[in-house]
Amino acid sequence: MEYFIGITPPDDYKAKIMAFRDRWSSNRLNEVVEPHITVKAQGGLKVDLCWLENVRQACSLIQSFQLSLSEPGSFGSAVTFLSVESSNVIDLHRRLVNAISPSQEILDQYFEMDQYHPHLTLGQTYWGLNETEIDEMKLLAMNELAPYPTFNVNFVRVYKEVEPNQYVPFVDIQLGTQKAE
């Protein structure tokens, strides 16, 4: 059983993304997890939940911020995604990683810290799409998912794996519950 931490877009836009993903019958991503932006991958988030209080503490010191989704991008021909514009999300990522303190090997395995590239995945070959569908999805997303929203990030969502490759919301953690001194 694994966990990870993400940011969810507003519900109406999340529904729009899910409907868009479902247009490709081979795309299994909606079966895996709801649309989100990963801010802390699985590495170091152990079943014993000893890390959860550190995450709560780190989040309490981070004020809410605005995040904008923007034009589609891709990681080669294997993944297409919506880009994320916000330096605050990188700061949030770094603070969460520091709160967990995973090994350098884990950081490298999950593309964290300097390798972190915030994004919202639309589809990938690992979840059933082929390279042609990835390209098609990227092109269609430019028109069909625009205008891209800007929204306030007031909380992060911890996801829990309930079956292999199936994640559900576990707990939402509010940002900025402690005022900066």
Image (cartoon, rainbow, N blue to C red):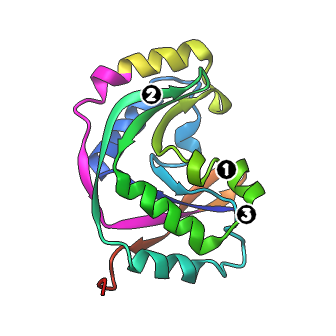
Q: Which quarter of the rendered picture does the C terminus lie within?
A: bottom left
Magenta stretch containing residue 157, yes or no? Answer: yes
Instruction: Report if residue 76 is visible in the image.
Output: yes
Amino acid at pointer 2: Gly
| Amino acid type at image mark 3 | Met
Q: Residues within 10 Å of mark 3 (few under 14, many from 20)?
A: few
Residue drawn at x 46%, y 42% is 119
Residue at the (61%, 25%) spot, across then down? 78
Q: Residues within 10 Å of mark 1 (few under 14, many from 20)?
A: some
Decide: is 25 above or below 175. above
Picture disc at residue 164: none
Amino acid type, mark 1: Tyr
Q: Secondary structure at mark 2?
A: strand
Q: Is residue 25 left or right of residue 17?
A: right
- Among the 4 quarters of the image, the one containing residue 23: top left
Q: In the rendered image, which quarter contains the N terminus? A: bottom right
Q: Which residues are magenta?
A: 141-159
Residue 1 disc label: 3
In primary-sequence order, the first of circles 2 and 3 is 3
Find residue 133 and report its image quarter: top right
Residue that label 1 marks: 110
